[in-house]
Image (cartoon, rainbow, N blue to C red):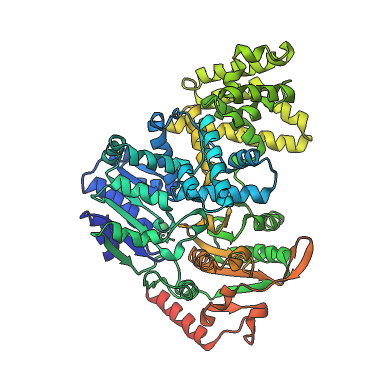
């Protein structure tokens, strides 16, 4: 097994003497070290899989890791292995320890839309900008492990005081709903561990060896969790690349890489230098771009996969033309190289760039899947159905109550709901509980009360069934009972209604599969779904389709042929980053994008682009000028005096060398 590794990789896999950090550039086999080490720990070091936890950044990465380990080792010996994101590990801990924190195990997990709604209510505003910035400020406080009380004590200005109070009110609301937000999934276990020795010890004994991928993107809370779980012995292997740190805006702190050696003086640091992913030209482009950032650690990266074709940088007239060029070049390349659609990825900075590309792909009949975009689980019809599941799991989830009770409309008027809300708020109970209070029954007319009570009774029956019945069946019953299909057709044109219903049926299939494969009941599945909505990644069946993805969501992945679109000033680097002097993080994003490509890379930019209804001339990204001329074929404005298609002497020599290398090996 170990002979599929180079020397430093093998050293990292076999090292059990204490904490270990593998620090290396993209494609150098860091993730491979983790998968192999899991197999090594079980197969050679005799550890029980139940005592090992591998933590990755996205659900998709977790799934892939599980598969890779599965290929190395018999399923029996992998039983109980934890491969998950920080958030799902946090969820698991919380579920088990909920009572220590005043939560019940079926707590709800609110997504960012729910969180924004609460903030919007507390602020009594609909100003999106204000809401968004408040949500993210609270999130940053949480990720830095600052509690509402601490925030209040530390407040230095009226603004900070206001924020701290809001944070307090927000947290109280969450508690009342028996709900947590994404940040709480990690923050709450960490707080619990800090204050409860017994619980911490239990988890330290359970998770005896930790492996952490993409370590550069951990935030303070996540870092603390690692420190707590690994205690003083520091039984962990972390792998990371400071040049790929792209989540600072979400509180990630790459200084954590440096902190490791302070916190764990015995830290063994291993560097990897050989890249096994990309041909030399792509790698040289990546190296050249990132060389313009100040360095935290010195790194070199080389590959012997041959020189490869020059990286192409093309200019399009506008965004539509750009998408068309990509579609056509992709088809031509596919035809020539005899590849499949699944060998291609189209990457972009922001989700909003996807739509134009999608249109062109459809016009050219190119199949595609999107990850990191508007998630399946974010669709309104899905959220409607999920609100029922949330309420069944946790009847204190007031936002879910409101959504479910009004979708479909069942004759419960706004006035009644307002009365219910006021009654519940006064007594600090949930809407659901208030329905059964005699005091409330007296306040409303029987015709108004009856549908409310029927609704709650129905939820009660479902709660009874949920732990017993197969998840898929139960969900079907639920949809029948509320006549959701009819409601969709009543409230929309036939075409969109049909699409929506199909989406819902997809959900039913998905839930049924989850129930069958993983033995989960409807309540457990509804908690898992909440996590999926946060980071991309529903199980996409392996279909032959082009992958479309944001740069952020492409982290850790690789594709034979990559198109990187919209490489312009104000997009990549993003306008906000230019204004706030965060171009270094954007450069790392560019580095991540380039290093996803294995064999070919095509980068595009536009001459002009429509912004707010007006055409604007746009500038090619500054990063394009940082690419090494010898490895790139430019077209358009950037071509300068190089005629398009001409091959320089150096290029010619390099191509010859590449051909010879191929012949030789
Ligand atoms: P990133 O920084 O993008 O996450 P990484 O360092 O995690 O990259 P991997 O994804 O582990 O890199 O490896 C990159 C590619 O190289 C994968 O296809 C992997 O299978 C392959 N690879 C890694 N190590 C070796 C090796 N020793 N021999 C052959 N192939 C390898
Ligand atoms: Mg990796």
Q: Is residue 27 left or right of residue 466?
A: left
> For residue 301, which quarter of the picture?
bottom left
Image quarter hosting the N terminus: bottom left
The foreground one among 191 and 615 is 191
Image quarter hosting the C terminus: bottom left
The foreground one among 13 and 329 is 13
Q: Is residue 363 left or right of residue 94?
A: right
Does residue 16 appear anywhere in the picture?
Answer: yes
Above or below, 295 relative to 65: below
Q: Position of residue 659 (x, y in %)?
A: 45, 78
- Residue at 68% x, 63% y is 323
Q: Position of residue 498 (x, y in %)?
A: 72, 35
Q: Is residue 396 left or right of residue 63?
A: right
Quadrant observed for ligand 1 in the rendered image: bottom left
Question: Number of numbered discs present?
Answer: 0
Q: Position of residue 100 (x, y in %)?
A: 38, 31
Does residue 4 appear anywhere in the picture?
Answer: no
- Residue at 65% x, 24% y is 422
> For residue 381, which quarter of the picture?
top right
> For residue 28, which quarter of the picture?
bottom left
- Residue at 33% x, 57% y is 33
Q: Position of residue 197 (x, y in %)?
A: 28, 37
The foreground one among 121 and 60 is 121
Q: Is residue 197 left or right of residue 402?
A: left
């Amino acid at each position: 097994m170990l002979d599929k590794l180079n020397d430093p990789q093998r050293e990292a896999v076999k090292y059990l003497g204490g904490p270990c950090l593998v620090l290396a550039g993209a494609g150098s086999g860091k993730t491979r070290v983790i998968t192999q080490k899991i197999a090594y720990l079980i197969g050679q070091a005799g550890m029980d899989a139940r005592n090992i936890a591998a933590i990755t950044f996205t659900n998709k990465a977790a799934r892939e890791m599980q598969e890779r380990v599965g290929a190395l080792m018999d399923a029996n010996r992998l039983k109980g292995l934890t491969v998950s994101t920080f958030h799902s590990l946090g969820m698991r801990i919380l579920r088990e320890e909920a009572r220590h924190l005043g939560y019940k195990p079926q707590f709800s997990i609110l997504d960012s839309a729910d969180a924004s709604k609460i903030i919007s209510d507390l602020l009594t505003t609909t100003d999106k900008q204000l809401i968004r910035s408040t949500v993210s400020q609270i999130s940053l406080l949480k990720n830095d492990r600052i509690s509402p009380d601490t925030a209040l004590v530390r407040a230095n200005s009226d603004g900070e005081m206001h924020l701290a109070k809001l944070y307090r009110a927000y947290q109280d609301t969450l508690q009342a709903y028996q709900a947590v937000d994404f940040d709480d999934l990690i923050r709450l276990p960490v707080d619990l561990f800090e204050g409860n020795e017994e619980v911490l010890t239990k988890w330290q004994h359970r998770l005896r060896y930790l492996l952490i991928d993409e370590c550069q993107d951990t935030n303070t809370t996540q870092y603390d969790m690692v420190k707590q779980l690994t205690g003083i012995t520091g039984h962990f292997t972390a792998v990371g690349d400071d040049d790929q740190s792209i989540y600072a805006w979400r509180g990630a702190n790459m200084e954590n890489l440096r902190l490791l050696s302070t916190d764990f003086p015995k830290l063994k640091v291993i560097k990897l230098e050989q890249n096994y992913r990309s041909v030399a030209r792509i790698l040289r482009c990546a190296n050249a771009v990132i060389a313009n950032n100040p360095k935290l650690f010195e790194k070199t990266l080389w590959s012997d996969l041959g020189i490869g074709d020059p990286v192409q940088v093309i200019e399009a007239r506008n965004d539509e033309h750009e998408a068309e060029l990509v579609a056509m070049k992709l088809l031509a390349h596919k035809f020539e190289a005899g590849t499949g659609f699944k060998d291609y990825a189209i990457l972009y900075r922001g989700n909003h760039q996807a739509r134009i590309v999608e249109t062109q792909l459809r016009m050219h009949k190119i199949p595609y899947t999107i990850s990191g975009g508007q998630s399946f689980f974010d669709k309104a019809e899905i959220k409607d159905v999920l609100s029922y599941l949330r309420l069944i799991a946790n009847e204190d989830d007031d936002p879910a109550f409101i959504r479910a009770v009004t979708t479909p409309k069942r004759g419960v008027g706004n006035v009644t709901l307002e009365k219910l809300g006021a009654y519940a708020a006064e007594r600090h109970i949930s809407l659901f509980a208030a329905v059964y209070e005699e005091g409330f029954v007296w306040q409303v007319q029987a015709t108004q009360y009856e549908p409310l009570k029927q609704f709650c009774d129905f939820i009660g029956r479902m709660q009874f069934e949920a732990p017993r019945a197969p998840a898929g069946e139960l969900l079907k019953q639920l949809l029948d009972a509320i006549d959701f299909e009819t409601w969709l057709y009543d409230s929309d044109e036939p075409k969109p209604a049909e699409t929506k219903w199909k989406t819902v049926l997809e959900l039913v299939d998905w839930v049924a599969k989850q129930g069958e494969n993983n033995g989960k009941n409807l309540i457990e599945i509804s908690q898992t779904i909440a996590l999926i909505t946060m980071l991309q990644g529903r199980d996409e069946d392996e279909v032959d389709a082009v992958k479309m993805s944001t740069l952020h969501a492409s982290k850790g992945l690789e594709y034979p042929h990559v198109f990187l679109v919209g490489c312009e000033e104000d997009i990549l680097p993003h306008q906000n980053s230019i204004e706030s002097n965060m171009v270094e993080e954007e450069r790392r994003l560019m580095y991540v994008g380039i290093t996803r490509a294995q064999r070919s890379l095509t980068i595009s930019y536009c001459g002009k682009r429509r912004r707010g209804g007006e055409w604007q001339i746009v500038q090619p990204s500054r990063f394009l000028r940082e690419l090494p001329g010898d490895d790139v074929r430019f077209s358009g404005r950037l071509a300068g005096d190089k005629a398009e298609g001409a091959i320089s002497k150096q290029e010619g020599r390099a191509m010859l060398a590449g051909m010879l290398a191929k012949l030789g090996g």
